[in-house]
Image (cartoon, rainbow, N blue to C red):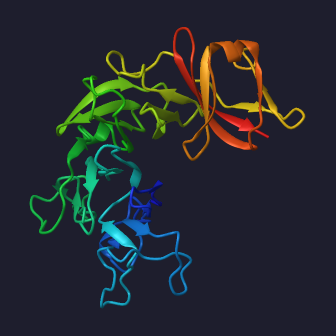
């Protein structure tokens, strides 16, 4: 079943939710083109207000707000998706970049804009979907009003890659001097291949150590990927991405500390291999920074219990891991 995957707050403060078409991959359905359903849509809601019987409000500039058709779901921001598996906003210009999992012919990458129709199940990528023979696209179909993808990945030959599945990533904005600046990184879950999309051209740039279930980024602009089978988070090589893309070793796994007398103790023994590190809360705020002297001398810190992100530097590489204070 295609249930979607991802939700993010936009710069406008609204919550965006990408939902799949809820269809059996072997049975045709038109949910994504039906504006009376949430399936196959990007939704946008205001979680800071309530509206009528809803626990949220619908932004007045949503494309179908105030529709004369009372059955139209006014939460819809864009539609025509099959299975939007991971998407993100470009931190520079706010573009919403989405990876939509294809059927048997193409995977696609879309720039999602308000009110637009991204084609499924009329089209799959930039081909015309054939509901009676999904392996063989139609020669022609009515694509009037459909937004084309900005890039596609072909399953060629189809028989050797029948279940390829795109995993959306992030635009790299860490270092303006890098040749990868402005490049969108994403992957293929089945083949573990890592791709870079720049100016409409897709390049294969590496193979991940594990199948990629998701990508992420930190406040510094580094890009990470999540290994599906081993649960390890990997970082795309060193921060400027000037040379090799994939690291030879994963970043550290999650670390857990217990409170001692109301505070936590941090030192080099607790975090071996690090010469400095920063603890950031889930709102992106730095709560503690330990440079070399403090780390090797040790210090106490009174932080609220919870989950934090730690980014640090060692002699030979950076590390990033989650920290649980309980």
Instruction: Judge whether 60 appears above or below 19 on screen.
Output: below
Residue at 24% x, 66% y is 117
Instruction: Give percent across and percent down for residue 102.
Output: 32, 51
Is residue 160 shown left or right of residue 57?
A: left
Question: Can residue 272 be seen from the camera position used here?
Answer: no
Is residue 12 shown left or right of residue 127?
A: right
Instruction: Judge whether 73 appears above or below 94 on screen.
Output: below
Question: Can residue 281 be seen from the camera position used here?
Answer: yes
Front-lying residue, 184 or 203: 184
Is residue 148 shown left or right of residue 194?
A: left
Front-lying residue, 265 or 269: 265
Residue at 48% x, 15% y is 248
Instruction: Give percent across and percent down for residue 218.
Output: 48, 36
Total of numbered circles in the picture? Answer: 0
Q: Residue furthest top?
A: 315
Residue at 27% x, 48% y is 108
Front-lying residue, 133 or 267: 267
Q: Quadrant of the image for the C terminus? A: top right
Is residue 248 shown left or right of residue 70?
A: right
Question: Residue 285 sits in which quadrant?
Answer: top right
Instruction: Judge whether 88 appears above or below 263 on screen.
Output: below
Instruction: Give percent across and percent down for residue 316.
Output: 52, 9
Instruction: Give percent across and percent down for residue 242.
Output: 31, 18
């Amino acid at each position: 079943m295609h249930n979607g995957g991802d939700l993010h707050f936009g710069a406008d403060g609204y919550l965006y939710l990408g939902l799949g078409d809820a269809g059996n991959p072997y049975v045709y359905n038109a949910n994504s083109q039906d504006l009376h359903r949430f399936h196959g849509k990007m939704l946008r809601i205001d979680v800071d207000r309530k509206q009528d019987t809803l626990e949220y409000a619908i932004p007045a500039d949503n494309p179908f707000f105030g529709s004369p058709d009372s059955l139209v779901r006014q939460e819809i921001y864009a539609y025509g998706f099959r299975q939007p598996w991971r998407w993100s906003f470009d931190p520079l210009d706010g573009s919403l970049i989405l990876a939509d999992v294809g059927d048997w012919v193409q995977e696609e990458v879309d720039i999602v804009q308000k009110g637009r129709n991204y084609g499924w199940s009329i089209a799959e990528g930039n081909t015309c979907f054939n509901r009676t023979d999904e392996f063989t696209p139609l020669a022609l179909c009515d694509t009037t009003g459909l937004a084309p993808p900005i890039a596609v990945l072909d399953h060629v030959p189809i028989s050797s890659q029948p279940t390829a599945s795109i995993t959306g990533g992030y635009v790299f904005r860490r270092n303006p001097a890098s040749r990868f600046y402005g490049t969108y990184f994403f992957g293929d879950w089945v083949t573990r291949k890592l791709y870079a999309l720049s100016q409409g051209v897709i390049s294969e740039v590496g193979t991940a150590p594990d199948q990629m279930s998701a990508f992420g980024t930190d406040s510094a602009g580094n890009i990470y990927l999540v290994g599906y089978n081993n649960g390890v988070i990997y970082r795309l090589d060193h921060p400027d991405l000037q040379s090799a893309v994939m690291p030879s070793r994963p970043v550290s796994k999650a670390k857990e500390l217990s409170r001692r007398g109301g505070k936590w103790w941090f030192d080099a023994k607790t975090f071996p291999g690090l010469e400095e590190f920063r603890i950031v809360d889930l709102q992106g705020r730095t709560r503690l920074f330990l440079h070399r002297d403090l780390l090797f001398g040790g210090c106490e810190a009174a932080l609220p219990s919870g989950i934090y992100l730690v980014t640090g530097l060692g002699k030979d590489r950076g590390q990033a891991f989650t920290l649980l204070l309980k």
